[in-house]
């Protein structure tokens, strides 16, 4: 993806939305959201549904399509799909082929790039750990490396345009991920954190210090954007404003509204914030280059974001 860095500097790109929300027209909620693999199982059990979900986001105007691998791991596929190592590795690679199939079949006439989703280790614990990072310090960093390495390698080998490290709760896990990334020096990536408030990552470090650490280091050679996802929209402005590092290209994709109830495994949608073109214009001035939706954001909302981006002042 030689032109990715140059391209990101010139406009705001639209990322897709929630895989779970996007797939619901084609499968039932419990099959996805209440499965330990959080929908990555559908790569094995229902490829057509995955393709259709991707195609809806392309129709909505997304320029970056995310692989269905947030919760994918070798151990997870071995445990819950009864696959061996090689079969699990190939299934992660297949997620990229499925995205390519959706792009080819939809034939939108515009460039749609593929982001390979790499979620945090905490997501595999199915206890909300990605929103507090409590496992950091309890798991050996070498074990964390060994868990992440093959899933990243599979996505790189499959030819993703960009690796998307997303919902990362801590600087330590980000460090591990970027060390692995450095083993694939030609691979571009985005790094997106989960944050617990308007200042701090979920694990407690400040977002500003994390940006300073990674955007100012050798990692910048491979990072096309750094930012936040899976949080309340109202946190975007203070988080971006907290950063004093210059010339940062940001990525942000908030939840569609409501609060996740980890006990009931559903969304409380009693409070929703409607994103406006004024919001996007403000964030653009702060350096936002890639915007989309996370949990509870479907193709209809991504289509609305497409319209907002297209109406941004030039």
Image: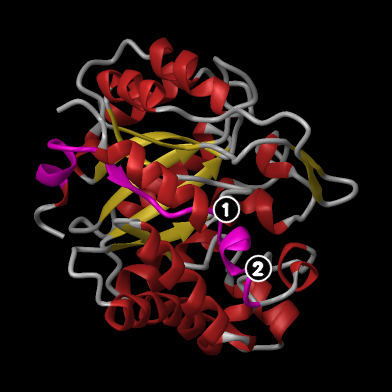
Q: How many marks?
A: 2
Q: Tell me what residue is drawn at x 18 percent, y 38 percent.
A: 11
Q: Tell me what residue is drawn at x 62 percent, y 59 percent.
A: 21
Q: Quadrant of the C terminus?
A: top left
- Which circle's residue, 1 or 2, is located before the other in the chain? 2
Q: Is residue 29 above or below residue 62?
A: below
- Magenta stretch contains residue 9: yes
Write the start and end of the magenta stretch as one range.
5-26
Whether the residues at callouts 1 and 2 have beta carbons within 8 Å, the answer is: no
Q: Is residue 273 above or below residue 243?
A: below
Q: Tell me what residue is drawn at x 33 percent, y 53 percent.
A: 181
Q: Quadrant of the N terminus?
A: bottom left
Q: Which residue is mark 1?
A: 144
Q: Nearer the viewer, residue 100 or 301?
A: 301
Which of discs 1 and 2 lies nearer the camera? The answer is: 2
Q: Secondary structure at mark 1?
A: helix
Q: Label 2 neighbourhood size at 10 Å, few (<14), some (14-19), many (20+)? A: some
| Image disc number at residue 24 | 2
Residue 180 in the image: state x and y as whole percent. Answer: 38, 54
């Amino acid at each position: 993806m030689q032109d990715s860095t140059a391209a990101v500097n010139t406009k705001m790109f639209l990322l897709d939305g929630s895989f779970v929300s996007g797939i619901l027209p084609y499968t039932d909620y419990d099959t996805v959201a209440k499965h330990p693999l959080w929908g990555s199982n559908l790569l094995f059990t229902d490829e057509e549904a995955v393709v259709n979900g991707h195609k809806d986001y392309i129709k909505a105007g997304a320029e970056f399509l995310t692989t269905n691998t947030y919760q994918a791991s070798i151990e997870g596929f071995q445990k819950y799909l009864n696959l061996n190592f090689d079969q699990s590795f190939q299934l992660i690679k297949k997620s990229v082929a499925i995205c390519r199939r959706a792009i080819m079949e939809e034939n939108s006439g515009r460039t749609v790039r593929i982001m390979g989703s790499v979620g945090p280790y905490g997501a595999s614990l199915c206890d909300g750990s990605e929103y507090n990072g409590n496992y950091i310090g309890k798991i050996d960093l070498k074990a964390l490396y060994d868990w992440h390495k093959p899933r990243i390698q599979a996505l790189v080998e499959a030819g993703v345009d960009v690796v998307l490290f997303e919902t990362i709760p801590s600087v330590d896990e980000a460090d591990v991920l970027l060390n692995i990334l450095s083993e694939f020096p030609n691979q571009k990536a985005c790094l997106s954190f989960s944050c617990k408030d308007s200042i701090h990552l979920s694990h407690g470090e400040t977002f500003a210090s994390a940006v300073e650490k990674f955007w100012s280091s050798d990692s910048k050679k491979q990072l096309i954007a750094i930012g936040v996802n899976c949080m309340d929209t109202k946190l975007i402005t203070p988080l971006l404003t907290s950063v004093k590092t210059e010339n940062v290209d940001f990525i942000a994709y908030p939840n569609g509204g409501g609060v996740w109830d980890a006990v009931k495994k559903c969304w409380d949608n009693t409070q929703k914030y409607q994103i406006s073109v004024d919001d996007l214009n403000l964030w653009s001035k702060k350096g936002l280059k890639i915007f989309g939706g996370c949990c509870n954001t479907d193709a209809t909302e991504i289509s609305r974001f497409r319209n907002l981006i297209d109406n941004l002042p030039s």
